Amino acid sequence: MTGEQKSFYRVKISGYAHDGVGVGRIEGQVIFVPGALRGEEVLVEIDERRKGVLRGRVKEVLCPSAERLEPTCAVYAQCGGCQLQHVTYAAQLRIKQEIVQDALQRIGGFKDVSVQPVLGMETPWRYRNKGCFQVGRRKDKVSLGFFEEGTHCLVAESCRHLFSPKVTSLVDSLEEILSAFQVKVAQKGVPGLHQILIRESRAKGEILLVFIYSGKYCDKKKAIAREIFRKYSEVVGVCQSENTKAAGSILDRKVEIIKGRNWLEDKIGSLTFIISPASFFQVNSMQTNVLYEKVLEYVALSGEAEVVDAYCGIGTISLFLAKRARKVTGIEIVPEAVADARKNAERNGINNVEFVQGKAEKIMPQMVTRGARSQVVVVDPPRKGCDRELLDSIITVRAQRVVYVSCNPATLVRDLRYLADGGYVLKEVQPVDMFPQTAHVECVVLMSKVED
């Protein structure tokens, strides 16, 4: 490619990186171009040069793709919440399929495995049942939104199209209420209110709020909670928590109730679940049932199998499995989630499930030592993937089938390769679109034990 000006180049986009960013070349060097689509020719300004890899910014789309759209969100270019609003939904699904296929081949060395077409949504908007909104100030008004990508600059009115109209309306009202009560907002090292966690039950229409502070709680908290309850009958609880950590869980201290209760009730299929503020629950209620039905298909239970569900959370997958298994053992590190899981089993009248609190990578080896021989193991780990000890335990227990649910293709294929080297064969990979308009993709994978 030849330079148009000092640092402007015409670039032909040939494909996509793992995060949905367009990829091209300038004089043999790879360049990553956010917002550019395959097949497009774009005028690019180089922002960054690092170890022979370039990163650029689109200044002009010279030859646009037929798959390019005008983003729905007015602040899409500033907000870091979505990456693919400028692409047709059909193209989004193909991009995600390619991201998974590329990871399997490039990271895992799986050359002959085909990825199934992504299971998408009929209406890929307003699907999120949970959001942690950053709190800032714009002039004299409290503002809620998300950070601009790679910064701590708040973008107001961001990602509103991903939440229900009810939550969007509530966020607008919260800005007004907090401004009227002159709530102190955390900024530049000064403690105060810095996040609001909003969880919504799509089945029941209930909403739970958690105000997260970086220091002393607001002394007007009860009056604020009363005003929220007065304006929104759907709100069943207003809580507060303190978080002084720079990273990690947003709820690193006890959640205290200000008004109402500290839990929601939601449904997946025919099952009912209690959800606490810190408990993991899939953010896309509509697609969760699609995801779990695929898990059920892959485990292929006949009613006599014993199953281990590692990283079980509040027991969502475990209780689905229990309908077709002799016994399910769910393992979860978060005590509150285990308590919720036990309540959920009782609530649904399921008595062939045992929930164990602890690290899956510690509990599984103990089960192996005691002679446990589970025929099926299901894992749904955090983004960092499975611990090596857990994978070793799966190999040792010689489970007939392993079903792996993952939100991170890179760590997924790393773990799949380890299991493959330990005597398992990769049978099928099914992506599910849990996060439309973003580059994130969930996968369900089936592996089977190679017969000796």
Image (cartoon, rainbow, N blue to C red):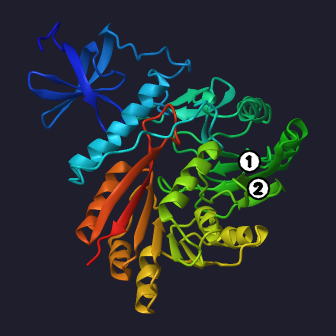
x and y percentages locating residue 259 in the rendered image:
84, 53
The residue indicated by pointer 1 is 201
Between residues 154 and 37, which one lies in front from this camera angle? 37
x and y percentages locating residue 30 in the rendered image:
17, 29
Between residues 196 and 72, which one lies in front from this camera angle? 72
CB within 8 Å, label 2 to label 1: yes
What amino acid type should be assigned to the residue bearing mark 1? Ser
What amino acid type should be assigned to the residue bearing mark 2? Glu
Q: Which disc number belongs to residue 265?
A: 2
Q: Quadrant of the C terminus?
A: bottom left
Q: How many marks?
A: 2
Classify 325 as above or below 366: above
Extreme-right residue of the structure: 230
x and y percentages locating residue 199 in the rendered image:
69, 47
**Residue under the point 70% across and 50% down:** 210
Q: Which disc number belongs to residue 405?
A: none
x and y percentages locating residue 407 in the rendered image:
44, 50
Extreme-bottom residue of the structure: 370
Density class for disc 2 (Cα within 10 Å; few <14, some 14-19, many ≥20) is some
Classify 173 as above or below 107: above
Side (left or right) of 235 relative to 156: right
Residue 256 at least partly seen: yes
Extreme-left residue of the structure: 27
Q: Quadrant of residue 5?
A: top left
Label 1: which secondary element: loop
**Residue under the point 63% across and 29% down:** 160
Side (left or right) of 8 relative to 84: left
**Residue under the point 47% across and 36% down:** 152
Label 2: which secondary element: strand
Marks 2 and 1, the one that precedes in the sequence:
1
Q: Quadrant of the N terminus?
A: top left
